[in-house]
Image: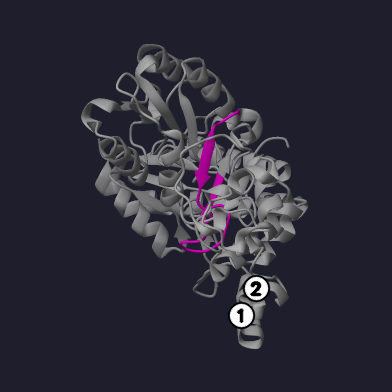
Amino acid sequence: MGEYIFDRAWARAQDAADPLRDFRGEFLIPPHGEGEQVYLCGNSLGLQPRATRQALLDELDDWARLGVEGHVHGRHPWLPYHREVRDALAEVVGARPDEVVAMNTLTVNLHLLMASFYRPTRERHAILIERNAFPSDRHAVASQIAFHGFDPDHALIELDGDEPGGAISPAAIERALHEHGPRIALVLWPGVQYLTGQAFDLAAIAKLAHAQGCTVGFDLAHAAGNVECNLHDAGADFAAWCSYKYLNSGPGAVAGAFVHERHAGAELPRFEGWWGHREDTRFQMRPEFDPAPGADAWQLSNPPIFSLAPVRVSLEIFRRAGMPRLRERSKRLTGYLEWLIRTRLDDVLEILTPAEPERRGAQLSVRVRAGRDAGRSLFDHLAAQGVLGDWREPDVLRLSPAPLYNRFEDCLALAESVLAWRAGGASWLAP
């Protein structure tokens, strides 16, 4: 697309020429003053699609109008509701439809899937994760280890970053698996690391782990709707993700789970519930559990309609936009933000996220070079100016130009606001 330019007219021209520009109009942008907020926080909570409100009202109206018959006669019948999101969900994460299911929340799904896929033995009971994993993941795996009677202090292996900014090289992952592989039962790895924004080659990790006899699961909380995951081809045993970040389905929205088709019909241990029973015999009320095909067998309870309706709305938008096109737009937006920081703000901000486009998604994680207090000062300044990023202790500011609704002009506004803060606070820049 040629050279980037620090110029508002240029940024607006890029936005006007973008083939995905109209999708921004399908979202409610939070107001700021007389205008709109520069919202760079989609990695934490995505914005509300305009169609979400009506979708929820429709379900409330069907409940009022039909009562229990809404299960079969609603505009979107509740009985098979989870199937309405299945195909689009599979497209977003690169899976086959029977490999995915929308259910529960992320950590619940991780626990349910680890009940099936973390099968520790005396010789092989360790779990490999990254250092600085999202706390919920660490809590989940440590509690699973302890639940099975092992000591997390010895069985939880946390791999440190070995690259500038805290990124983890492929070589470091390979070395860890070579060193610890015989005692690792499970590798639970992020698609995109929440703190650094680093994206990983899922297929390469799955291949390395399987070669050592390890089971492989992926947490795609920051990857689903952000990067192309290609879960089926990557060969993971299982995966889980939330849908309130890049998938824009609202706070606490129903999450997703993936079980590779090679495990369909396998005699796996599993916590079972009525909704995981085959649909064609479920209402015969037999005491025996007859598992549904594919990932559906991991369902426990009937779908929460008011939480699934926003997922359905969001995934319809993703289906029209297409992950390949969104990914290309994301690379351009994030590339512009990176260029602005490196060429105009390098004395203020240090980028922690890898520079290679294939090793990151929409998120750039940065540190203020002057230290943590300066970082909080900048974060507060940006928020006051209507530029919202995301602060993570102790000193990381995460900035995420989401391709469905962010613009080149948003990236430029961020840079201008940082420049204004720098001009007004020279003391922060003192060595």
> Label 1 sits on what residue type?
Val
Q: On residue 71, which mark appears?
A: 2
> Label 2 sits on what residue type?
His
Q: Quick check: marks 1 and 2 in contact, CB under 8 Å?
A: yes
Percent position of residue 189, x then y? 45, 33
Q: Does residue 220 show up?
A: no
- Give the camera-side residue of 412 and 97: 97
Q: Which residues are magenta?
A: 235-257
Tell me the element at label 2.
Answer: helix
Q: Residue at x 55, y 20 (%)?
A: 207
Q: Quadrant of the N terminus?
A: top right
Number of numbered discs: 2
Magenta stretch, overall SS: loop
Q: Does residue 288 show up?
A: yes
Q: Relative to 398, say whether 317 is above or below.
A: below
Residue 272 on the magenta segment: no
Distance in Å between CA atoms under marks 1 and 2? 6 Å
